[in-house]
Amino acid sequence: MRRSLPLLLAALVALVLAPPAQAAPGFAVGYRTIPGQGGTPLKAFVVEPTGRGSGPFPLLVLPSSWGVNNIEYVGAAARLAYESGYVVISYTSRGFHDSAGEIDVAGPDTVADVSRVIDWGIAQARGDASRVGVGGISYGAGQSLLAAAADPRVKAVAALSTWTDLARSLYPNETVSGQAVDLLLTAGKLTGRPGPVLRDAEAAYREKRFEDVLPISPPRSPMSRIGSIQAAVMIGNAWNDGLFPPSQITDFFTALTTPKRLMLSPGDHATAELFGAAGLPNEIWDSVGRWFDHHLKGVANGIDREHPVQVKPNNGGSWRSHPTWAAATARTDTVPLAADRIGAGWPTIAESGTVLVSGALQGFLRLPVGVSTPLIDRGAAAVWRGPVQWGATTVSGTPRAHLTVTPSAARTTLFAYLYEVNALGLGALITHKPVTLTGTHTRAVDLDLEPTVWNVGVGNRLVLVVDTVDARYQGSSAPGSSVAFGADSWLAVPRS
């Protein structure tokens, strides 16, 4: 019965998604076993166009996300095959679910699997070797960028909710993103078979030796291989992505020299494109289709004439376009910050929220992480209030806090939060960032918060809060220690 389940699932998918029998063109769905790197069996749904001749057809390869199987993209694949004539292969990544092997965290074998699936698609599914695209969400997105650097046959990439620098994503400013790491480790063990790299990384994490995990990051980070990428690259990520925050994306996008497109919108990890993967209407996947159509089929759909940077404000509003990411910021206002001293190691009500949950609430319901600033413990947090904004304004870009800091402990973690606050002192979190400091000497810290686009309401003000404990992260601040902030500190606010 266990072996027949994938076949039954394939039959049900084909029955549900198949167009009427008389429709032409159409598509066919099959459940296949594809030999990956070293012959490792990978399980895949292969969606092929029908009623369009004998091919060959442009080929799209979509590796599954972390913890998800090959059903992930079948809805989108059916639309792409039916509407545009693609052969689409949605397969379970090595080490997960019905595919064999072990999880190597986007290691050499997993990246090579993409090329082996391309080989199979060309030889067995009428794929066109000269028109190959790869893409995916999360783990599939990172694999796609790495595969594009390794395989020159890849002409176009759609990477959604991706990472480009693994260390910066999960260890920002030497601060472990604990909720994100726990989520990934748990999902890996529940849905797959961790290999030696993942097992060793978990052991180091549990023993609070996360710095020992860092050597695995460069070979698994597309930023390290950006010079080898020749494909046209589209990236779609969310402002509140709790696994792969947007700062590493904007830096990668800026450095990329091939045709490129960046879409940043409200939501958390994988939420902005979630329904599109199932084949439902979705503006991110609409752009994915247009991107592949233009770069693989030569369709003159105008996407190459649009500004490559597309951003939607995190708290509501329509898409805005810019020729570069830097152009999203028209000017920068500087707000001076007064001297202060706080006790470290004690939590306050200022928090960054919960991974996946908080960003999803912001994206779907416009419910931000909130705070009542009058109730923030001034003994455990520094609170700086900016001027009231009497005209409409938008924070657009990367806010920076320049802090002159003197910690009293050998290791201290700071968490900076930027809020929009109304006349009653009620705030909505705009962006945040952690940083961990070593040593007790006085130093200037330039802390770049995560990029954002946020509309500030008339009559509201910006408030910067810095404390030393946040439930999302594994901080290093010890109770009984303190942190002093010098009077030459300031906040730089980017404006559109």
Image (cartoon, rainbow, N blue to C red):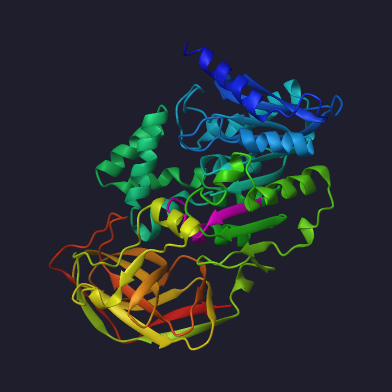
Q: Is residue 183 left or right of residue 48?
A: left
Vertical placement of residue 24 versus 290, above or below = above
Vertical placement of residue 278 versus 4, above or below = below
Q: Quadrant of residue 91?
A: top right
Q: Is residue 485 left or right of residue 9?
A: left
**Numbered label tally:** 0
**Viewer-proximal residue, 403 or 54?**
54
| Residue 430 seen in the figure | yes
Q: Is residue 23 left or right of residue 145?
A: right
Q: Which residue corresponds to the image point at 65% horizontal and 24% vertical from the top-left?
A: 14
Q: Which residue corresponds to the image point at 54% horizontal and 32% vertical from the top-left?
A: 110
| Residue 153 seen in the figure | no
Vertical placement of residue 259 versus 43, above or below = below
Does the magenta segment cover residue 239?
A: yes
Considering every residue shown, the one lying at the far right of the view is 53
Q: Position of residue 275 (x, y in %)?
A: 57, 44
Q: Position of residue 232 (x, y in %)?
A: 71, 50
Q: Quadrant of residue 469?
A: bottom left
Q: Is residue 175 left or right of residue 296?
A: left
Q: Which residue corresponds to the image point at 54% horizontal and 83% vertical from the top-left?
A: 392
**Viewer-proximal residue, 368 or 396?**
368
The C terminus lies in which quarter of the figure? bottom right
Q: Which residues are magenta?
A: 234-248
**Viewer-proximal residue, 53 or 488?**
53
Q: Position of residue 222 (x, y in %)?
A: 56, 48
Q: Which residue corresponds to the image point at 49% horizontal and 83% vertical from the top-left?
A: 458
Does the magenta segment cover residue 358?
A: no
Q: Position of residue 23 (x, y in %)?
A: 81, 29
Considering every residue shown, the one lying at the far top of the view is 1
